[in-house]
Amino acid sequence: MGQKHKLQRKQGIKPTPDTPYIRFLDKTTFIAGVIGPFTVLPQIWGIFSTHSAAGVSLTTWLLIFIVTLPWVFYGIAHKDKSIIVSFMLWEIANAAVVVGVLMYP
């Protein structure tokens, strides 16, 4: 299915129909993409307010940062605002945790 969509894009064909459901889904995923990264705020707050990252795995958060990064480039390559905004926010949140773990081991 993914290859079909790539071919359709190359041919200038929009792969998904423009229906009320699709427009609703686009808006909903954009909102979720913006709100989602804020779920990491309690972790960030915990690290920086206590000056301790005890129990927070640097390896895990570094890997999360690394595997999220390609999504930023994917969004840019496909000019997909939802993906770009969402994953840039995720990268900022993930980077804040990594910095906190490095600052307060």
Image (spheres, helix red, strand yellow):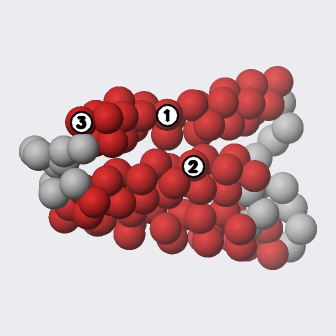
Question: Residue sitting at 66 percent across and 30 percent down?
Answer: 31
Residue 20: x and y in percent read 82, 24
Instruction: Report, in whole angstroms, how far the alpha carbon at label 1 lies from the one at label 2.
Output: 8 Å
Q: Residues within 10 Å of mark 2 (few under 14, many from 20)?
A: some
Q: Is residue 43 visible?
A: no
Of the residues shown, which amino acid type is indicated by label 2? Leu
Question: Residue sitting at 61 percent across and 71 percent down?
Answer: 73
**Of residues 38 and 75, which is closer to you in this image?**
38
Q: Nearer the viewer, mark 1 or mark 3?
A: 3
Q: Which residue matches tag 2?
A: 89
Q: Which residue matches tag 3?
A: 50
Residue 93: x and y in percent read 46, 48
The single residue placed furthest to the left in the displayed view is 55
Q: Is residue 92 left or right of residue 81?
A: left
Of the residues shown, which amino acid type is indicated by label 3? Thr
Tell me whether circle 1 and circle 2 mark residues in contact (CB < 8 Å). Answer: yes
Q: Which residue matches tag 1?
A: 38
Q: Is residue 37 above or below residue 84?
A: above
> Which SS class for mark 1?
helix
